[in-house]
Amino acid sequence: MTSTALEAWTNRNRKWIFAGPALIYIALLLVGPLAYTAFLSLTDARGSIQADFSFVGIQNYLTALTADPRFWPAAGRTLIFTAGALIAEMILGMVVALALHARLKTGAFVRITFLLPLVATPVAVAMMWLLIFEPTIGFANEALGWLGIPAQGWISEPATALPTLMLVDVWQWTPMVILILSAGLANLPQDQQEAAMVDGASGWNRFWHITLPTIWPTVMAAVLLRGIDAMKTFDLLYVTKGAGGGSRHEAETLNVYAYAQNFSYNDYGAASAISILFFAFIAIVIGILNGLGNKR
């Protein structure tokens, strides 16, 4: 190929040449593993990854959806954990972002303090709260004792484990919501607010009819980002409760359950089917959230 022909070929295909590295990256790190997981989900692979296996069709999916006593409870906990953490984070994040926007006693020190949880890794956060909620020597029960309230099981009790872990998630990730909403509020037109104040509109009316509709795309971006992230929460649950989500699986979500099937029981076919169903579950929730966002 002459230099002229090479130059002409490069000009004709430059879009693929520039996009090529990104497409290869996506294929290797996303499409490839997902395709292999989908392939394993149709087999009875277990024990050793090099052991012989056979195709079983959609049997692993049918077993998970109709005969597995841990699948649907894990799906319910995934939904409860995501919804509870997301609602609390959005409400707290909005309140703090509005306070920061109005400069209500919020200097640089306060702003930095709000953002500190974001710099810690999820594993370090889980270890720290595990010590705080320790039933006998933890600070949480010590503080309750000062108020005359009996000690609680916190993470160790099945009834309180999931709500307590939701509280930890809210503590760590509300600052990210504050950051996103603060960016939206920074571009809020002030003339509408001032006109509404002149007309005598209350603070709630100004928020509901002017502020919220104006920053609605930003709010939905925060909901989608945190919603997807909350559904995928693994580090916090695994470090505090282990692969099974506790002795009675009280904190076992779908991804924790898939991990247990894969690495504790070496049932690769079932684990892959659960992972694919979890992937579909996330896609459905994203579609619902997107639909709710477009209706506003």
Image (cartoon, helix red, strand yellow):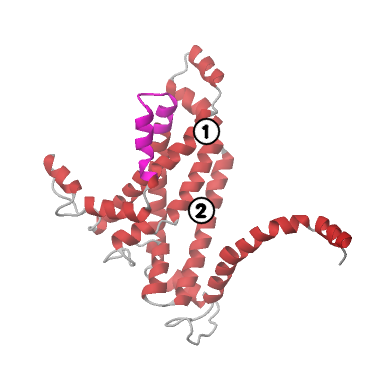
Q: Position of residue 26 (x, y in %)?
A: 61, 61
Residue sitting farthest toward the bottom:
52
- Seen from the viewer's position, the closer of residues 187 and 95 is 187
Discs 1/2, front:
1
Screen quadrant of the N terminus: bottom right
Q: Count residues near mark 1 (Cα–Cα under 10 Å), then give few for <14, some for 14-19, many for 20+.
A: some
Q: Is residue 97 magenta?
A: yes
Residue 288 visible in the picture: yes
- Residue at the image point whose x is 40% and y is 68% from the top: 259
Residue at which label 2 appears? 285
Badge 2 element: helix
Q: Earlier in the sequence, mark 1 or mark 2?
A: 1
Q: Residue at the location (39% across, 64% down)?
A: 256
Q: Which residues are magenta?
A: 96-118
72 or 279: nearer the viewer? 279
**Magenta-colored stretch includes residue 63:** no
| In the depicted structure, whether residue 89 falls above or below residue 282 | above
Disc number placed over residue 184 in the picture, else none:
1
Q: Which mark is residue 224?
A: none
Left or right, residue 213 beside residue 48? right
- The amino acid beneath tag 2 is Val
**Spot occupied by residue 240 in the image (x, y as percentages of width and height):** 29, 59
Badge 2: residue crowd in 10 Å (few <14, some 14–19, many ≥20): some
Tell me where residue 3 sits by quadrant: bottom right
Magenta region, main secondary structure: helix
Is 203 placed above or below 68 here? above
Amino acid bearing label 1? Gly
